[in-house]
Image: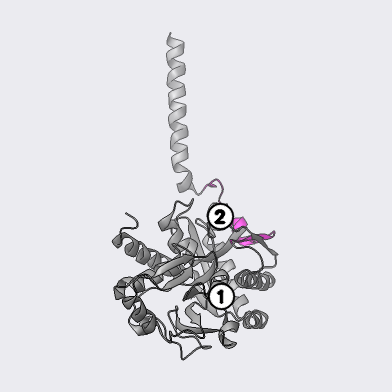
Amino acid sequence: MVAQRVKRERTGKFGLAFFLFLCLVPLLGLPERGYPQKDEVSSFPTRPINFVIPLPPGSKTDLAARLVVKTAEKFLGQPIVPVNKPGAALTIGVAAIATAKPDGYTIGLGAHSPLLVAPLLEKVPYHPINDLRQIMQFMSLNFGIVVRSDSSYKSLKDIVAYARQNPKKLTYGTNARGLLDMIMKQIAIKEGVEFTLIPYTSTFEAETALLGGHIEVTPGDFNISLVEAGQTRLLVLLKEEHSADDPHVPILKELGYDIPCPFFNGIMGPKGLPEGIVKKLEDALTRATKDPGFVKGMNDLRLPTGYRTGKDLGDYVARNFEAYKKFLTERGVIK
């Protein structure tokens, strides 16, 4: 009996000592499971980096993302390998980035819809602020509201006037419950009118329907070539600043609509990336955006560049996420 009691006391003391050791690990600076250590950070990168693109291959955004990481390779000294993971309104690819090991060897493309809208409207396996680390922004987007060139609508004011006289008759095409749909709904609410959404999976499909006369209005990343060819008319830009290509086209804000239009593409990784690795990635990608080859490639794609640091982009995403959360809560869409 005495021997058993002594054994239990020794076991208890060992268990307590082991528990205290585990508590002291962070204070002692001992390795944390899954996180790179100081020597790994200083030598990063020592092998190829996977770059997740939450889109199918071949789109302009996909090509722009490939262009910036390909250019950044020469500043990092390692290949950056694009891996397309499309599906579920880009959330599959974003989830792959958010759940990756935070060692810098899996990063990917970030965009407005899977960060600002999808997490509010559906259950996704990540939180856009808590589970992701923004590294930098390399691109803005040409988004606007277009109609057919033979349309009687010459301005957004004309669209609103028609909708006021003809409730629910004006049709627009875009992704259902996406950021563009949210913007159109905010315009309708401000004006006290009703539009009718015809859902499409992409702006390409919506523009095809527009040209065929199946819908009257399309908000989205409009085809510049169709505007230049005189097949569509650009009424308003869904941007936060004027476009150098279309300086005469108004933006929403100057028409009296204080509606966020946060359309962007950036690069992000999982939360927990060491600051040293983030700095190396951000520096290389920033240098890439200034490279003549990248600038020419973006011009050839007819896509606008747009730069933000990782910190600025993180603040921008958080601010707009809260803005759309507030809007959807006030409308009773979410609690």
Residue 229 in picture, x, y percent from top left: 60, 87
Q: How is the rendered protein coloured?
A: one colour
Disc number at residue 92? 2
- Three-letter amino acid code of the residue under disc 1: Gly
Classify residue 191 as left or right of residue 266. Answer: left
Find residue 45 and report its image quarter: bottom right
Residue 293 in picture, x, y percent from top left: 68, 81
Classify residue 255 as left or right of residue 223. Answer: left
At label 1, counting other C-alpha atoms closer than 10 Å, the crowd grade (few under 14, some 14-19, many 20 or more) is few
Q: Quadrant of the C terminus?
A: bottom left
> Residue at the location (70% across, 67% down)?
77
Q: Nearer the viewer, residue 309 or 253?
A: 253
| Mark 2–mark 1 distance (CA, rounded to whole Å) | 32 Å
At label 2, counting other C-alpha atoms closer than 10 Å, the crowd grade (few under 14, some 14-19, many 20 or more) is some
- Three-letter amino acid code of the residue under disc 2: Ile
- Reading the chain from its start, which is encountered first: label 2 or label 1? 2
Membership of 60 in magenta stretch: no
User: Label 1: which residue?
Assistant: 212
Residue 90 in picture, x, y percent from top left: 54, 60
Residue 312 in picture, x, y percent from top left: 45, 71
Residues rendered magenta in the picture: 30-54
**Vertical order, 194 against 236 (above or below):** above
